[in-house]
Amino acid sequence: MRSKARIIFIILILLLIVAQFFQPEKNSGEIDNNDLFSYISDIPDDIGSIIKTSCYDCHSNQTNYPWYSRISPLSWYLNKHIESGKHELNFSEYGDLSLREKLKVLQEVCEVVEEGSMPLKSYLLIHEEAKLTGNDVELLCSWIESESERILGE
Amino acid sequence: MKRKLMIFGLAIPLMFLGFSLPEFYPSVSGNVLSEEDMIEAPQEVMDILQNSCVGCHSTDSQAEKAKKKLDFKQWGKLSKAKKIAKLGAICDEIVEGKMPTEKFLSHYPDKALTEEDIDLICEWTDSEIETLIGSTEDPEEEE
């Protein structure tokens, strides 16, 4: 009985080691003029900091990978988040959006942070610094409102 | 025995009084002026909206999440930027099949949107957006 359990354990360890040779592609792509911070030259520091800290890992071309995030199969799970995050909204391609798309995206950003569905709870478990306070949400939504008016009036 | 009867006798009319309170009839106690903020659209679009959307997406709906996201009866109160954002979202949600919700359609399958309905609404949202954008822009500029 005991040696059976030991064999299974060893097999699992071996599988885990082999798994490390199969990693998803790292999300460290191009940051060009379309990136939010290049496109909007005057984002207030506090807003920029909130967006970078709480959003950019999933919603841009530049994810920060702490060492534990590179362990397969966890890395695949995280990659899924990043892929669907970027699909939904990619700040690195913000400049490419049409006016109407920008307005829509900005409005939705405010909504999801207000309702607390973003950042993801699972992300916040590991990244406490990404948690948005009530004040953060207010700041963000307020900036979004004025930015929306600004681009509409351009 | 007499006291019990008295209490019971009082309780029933009180119940009736309670149930007649405005909270139970939100559509009656709703803002009388809400008519002017109601969305306006061509009749065929309004028909679809009334049939498949306004039930949840209005001020008197019980669906809290829905009316927070979009309330057609408060449309007039939205800023231009928000209107444009919402119009875009309306088309996207129905094209992606996310709206009306599956739950809603399981109760009201006849309120499902046909391809034609979706096309009609998206055409309308498109032209509304153009109008809204155009009304702030310099006539010489293009989007």
Image (tube, rainbow, N blue to C red):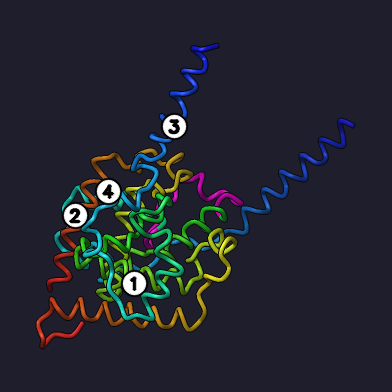
Q: Position of residue B114 (x, y in %)?
A: 52, 79
Res. A4 in view? yes
For the residues labelled 3 and 1, the Cα–Cα distance comes to: 46 Å
Extreme residue toward the bottom, this view: B140
| Dot 2: element | helix
Dot 4: what SS?
Answer: helix
Residue at 48 percent of width and 45 percent of height: A67
Determine the secondary structure under disc 1: helix
Magenta region: A59-75
Residue tagged 3: B15
Q: Residues within 10 Å of mark 4 (few under 14, many from 20)?
A: some
Q: Nearer the viewer, mark 2 or mark 3?
A: 3
Callout 3 and callout 1 share a chain: yes
Amino acid residing under circle 3: Met
Q: Which residue is mark 1?
A: B88
Residue B136, given in percent of the width and then of the height, sits at 13, 76
Q: Is residue A61 magenta?
A: yes
Q: Nearer the viewer, residue A131 or B51?
A: B51
Q: CA distance from mark 4 to mark 2?
A: 12 Å
Residue A153: assigned label: none
Residue on which disc 2 sits: A143
Judge whether residue A20 is colored magenta.
no
What label does residue A50 carry, if any?
A: 4
Q: Is residue B19 above or below residue A108?
A: above
Whether labels 3 and 4 belong to a single chain: the reply is: no
Residue at 44 percent of width and 48 percent of height: A120
